[in-house]
Image (tube, helix red, strand yellow):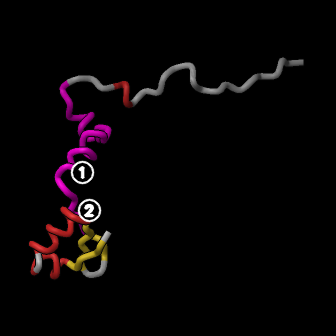
Amino acid sequence: MKTWPVQDAKARFSEFLEACLVDGPQMVTKRGAEAAVLVPAAEWRRLHATAKPSLKDLLLSAEARTEFLVPQRGNARRRRIAPMR
C-alpha cells in the first residue's frame, strides 16, 4: 500500500484515485501519522457487508440482537469440585 502525504493526495487527486483503482488501497498521512485509507468502492462494499454490527448499531436497533451478545450455553468448561472428606 502506497503512502501519500495529505498535501500530495490533495494536489494530485486524479493520480491518487487512479492509483487506488489500479493498485488497491492507498494510505493518507497527516503530519506523518496514518490518517485515512482510500479503497475502491467494490472492496469497501465487500468489507462493509462482512462486518459484524458495532455495539452502537446493536444498541440503536429496533429489534433485540442478543445472538451477538450472549454466548451459547454449554460451551463453558466447569471446574470439578473435589468431594469433601
The magenta-colored residue range is: 35-62
Residue 46 image position (x, y, % from top left): 25, 44
Query: Looking at the rendering, in which quadrant would you find the C terminus?
Result: top right
- Rate crowding at label 2 as few (under 14), some (14 to 19) or many (20 or more) other CA atoms within 10 Å: some
Marking on residue 32: none
Residue 49 image position (x, y, % from top left): 25, 39
Which SS class for mark 2?
loop
Marking on residue 43: 1
Q: Residue at coordinates 59% horizontally, 26% vertically from top-left?
A: 76
Q: Residue at coordinates 24% horizontally, 77% vertically from top-left?
A: 4
Residue 34 higher or lower than 85, as above or below: below
Q: Residue at coordinates 71% horizontally, 26% vertically from top-left?
A: 79
Q: Residue at coordinates 11% horizontally, 78% vertically from top-left?
A: 12
For residue 54, which quarter of the picture? top left
Q: Earlier in the sequence, mark 1 or mark 2?
A: 2
Residue 35 image position (x, y, % from top left): 25, 69
Residue 63 higher or lower than 15, as above or below: above
Residue 42 image position (x, y, % from top left): 19, 49
